[in-house]
Amino acid sequence: MNIGLVDVDGHNFPNFALMKIAAFHRAQGDNVEWAVPLFGEYERVYQSKIFTFTPDEVANWGGGTGS
């Protein structure tokens, strides 16, 4: 399974939620990478942000029901 990760805040602070999700999926044998809109094909995309003042990610990932 291809898993895409999106760090909404950027890369200035470690996002432990995404690290735990990545570790879980890697242990299951899944391919985990930083998601790239329009160029990557993923079965699941996880987004996480640390700060509430950061604007939400607005990229179109092509379906899904998560928010």
Image (spheres, rainbow, N blue to C red):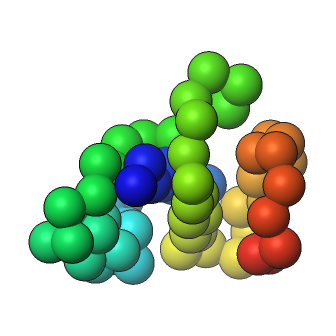
Using residue 62 as the reference point, say whether residue 11 is left or right of it: left
Write the residue at 14% across / 72% down: 27
- In the image, residue 56 lies at what x, y percent? 79, 60
Q: Residue furthest top?
A: 39
Using residue 25 as the reference point, say whether residue 61 is left or right of it: right
Q: Is residue 42 above or below residue 47?
A: above
- In the image, residue 48 lies at what x, y percent? 56, 69
Q: Residue furthest left?
A: 27
Specify the quadrant that holds the C terminus. bottom right
Specify the quadrant that holds the N terminus. bottom left
- In the image, residue 37 lies at what x, y percent? 68, 32
Using residue 7 as the reference point, say whether residue 14 is left or right of it: left
In-front residue for pair 57/25: 25
Q: Is residue 9 above or below residue 49?
A: above
In-front residue for pair 65/14: 65
Write the residue at 36% across / 43% down: 33
Whether residue 22 is visible, yes or no, is yes
- In the image, residue 36 lies at what x, y percent? 57, 31
Write the residue at 28% across / 58% down: 30
Q: Is residue 7 above or below residue 33?
A: below
Using residue 34 as the reference point, say whether residue 61 is left or right of it: right
In-front residue for pair 32/8: 32
